[in-house]
Image (cartoon, helix red, strand yellow):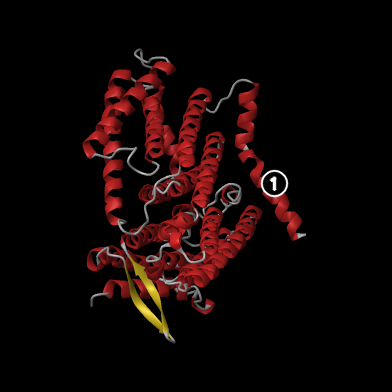
Amino acid sequence: MAVLPAFVVVMLIAALLVSAALPTRFASAPFIRSGAWLRLATTALLGASLAAGPWLGLQSRPLLQAPIGDASIDLLYWNGLAWLMLALVSFIGWIVARFSRRQLDGDPGGATYYRHVALTLGGILLAVVAGNLLLMLAGWLAANFGLRRLLAYYQEHPGAQEGARMKYAVDQLGAALLVGAVVLISQTYGTLNLAALAQVDASAAADAAAAGLVAWLLVFAAAVISVQFPFHFWLPEALATPTPVSALMHAGIVNAGGYFLIRLSGLLVAAPSALTMLAAAGAATLLLGGFAMLAQSSVKKTLAFSTVAQMGLMMLQCGLGAWTAAMLHIVAHSLYKAYAFLASGDVLVTAQAVKPLHGEASAQQLPAAVRLAVAVAIVATCYLAVATATGLSPLAKPGGFLLGAVLCIALVRRTWVLLQDNLLRMAAVSAVTTLGLCLVYSFAYLAIDAVVAGSTIARAPAPVQTVLSLGVGAALAALLAWELAVDRRPSGRVATAFYVHALNGFYVDAAARRVLRSVST
């Protein structure tokens, strides 16, 4: 009875994986074709996931061992980090299963679609809670196999097939890096169970070179999995798929690289330079995705480049050792991006609804520069007040300065937009809502820090990472200035040329397409 929720979770994950092999002769049954079985399974899984935390506690420990000869494999490695991610992915899967009922209603391929969704969801859940690296690897491979089938669901659409082929090429590289890391971990540390690996001191490993290589392989694998530059090219091209698939992919699958690094953070201390490289790659991806996002006119492509930028920020946080902030970012991004994709069909209705508000000119409206100064003053005051009240000093946490700058820049942009209307009224509204958002972020950070406490290894950032943080903060400020200045309508030769390059994603996808075609021929 003590591990009943864990047993239920394992059985439900196994049921999702097994259902992917459901014989096609059952596809005509209404219960199968309509996806009712998947909605029932995800409801049970969500309930079991939410109950598992209070029932099992958040202490790190292995659960449900499977004996193999003289050794044993831990089926689950349980702690606060695993519970948080399990509940998050279960919730996303529950939403996707219900939304799919509308979009796939009457679709003749519905039974096949739901089987692949089950395989994808079951695979990523297995990777999340696995207590052994072989199980984690198997779960990730299963999830990507199912996702590629979903990306190619519209077989008559050339764009869908092209996106699936691009992802397949990237998956092969990610799989090779992960397999290499798993083999080397087994040879270096003598175990693949996460509970045992959590106890090792990678910085004092007997074979320092092998331990360092393990860290580099894990970092490179995570960069490939979580669409870091230049391996992000497939994501903006994989949009010709049912909307629930996009939501599941952007909210659940691409986060896997960051989660793996947080889960295995103890093995990364053997190569601090690898984390510095990861932070630099994350910074480059963040800026590239951010500029490209601002130039897009397609709703889905804007969201795709937004995901690229957000994954860059997540990897930057991991590279700086800000594990709690990275986990908070995964949670917030997953919830937002699932909502954004599933609500993308209402974008015109929403824009029409808010148009009258922005169409009313105000006699009190100030010039853009003055509004920007007012926005900066409001955000700075609210941020400092909340930081003082909660005791969260940005200088006391790894990467705290940069993360505080990112939050403030986002809030300045939001406040600047609000101040386009009645200045006095909207200044008061902006101050109250900005204060509320800062409080929500701070308490969310403290809550997640309490949940994942003991699940990660803290370390002091290197001086080069501090310099990198300052540079990225300045670049993000420049990104905000460019957005506010051109407002997607650039003027001037340089600005126009840059806008065109950003609109085309700086041609990374075109270069990747040429490389893939040359390799395939």
Residue at 52% in and 27% down: 482
Question: In the rendered view, would you say 516 is above or below 10?
Answer: above
In the image, taking residue 239 as reference, residue 470 lies left or right, namely left
Q: Position of residue 77 (x, y in %)?
A: 36, 69
In the image, taking residue 318 as reference, residue 213 lies left or right, namely right
Residue extending furthest top? Answer: 363
Question: In the rendered view, would you say 321 is above or below 295?
Answer: below
Residue at 31% in and 58% down: 454
Q: Quadrant of the C terminus?
A: bottom right
Amino acid type, residue under disc 1 in the picture: Ala
Residue 391's quadrant in the figure?
Answer: top left
Please state which of residues 251 and 464 is positioned toward the viewer in this rendering.
464
Q: Secondary structure at mark 1?
A: helix
Residue 436's quadrant in the figure?
Answer: top left
Please state which of residues 28 and 6 is positioned toward the viewer in this rendering.
6
Question: In the rendered view, would you say 413 is above or below 103?
Answer: above
Q: Position of residue 380 (x, y in %)?
A: 32, 27
Residue 179's quadrant in the figure?
Answer: bottom right
Q: In this orientation, does residue 56 appear?
A: yes
Q: Position of residue 28 (x, y in %)?
A: 49, 74
Residue labelled with disc 1: 511
In the image, taking residue 411 as reference, residue 209 lies left or right, namely right
Q: In this orientation, does residue 101 appear?
A: no
Q: Quadrant of the N terminus?
A: bottom left
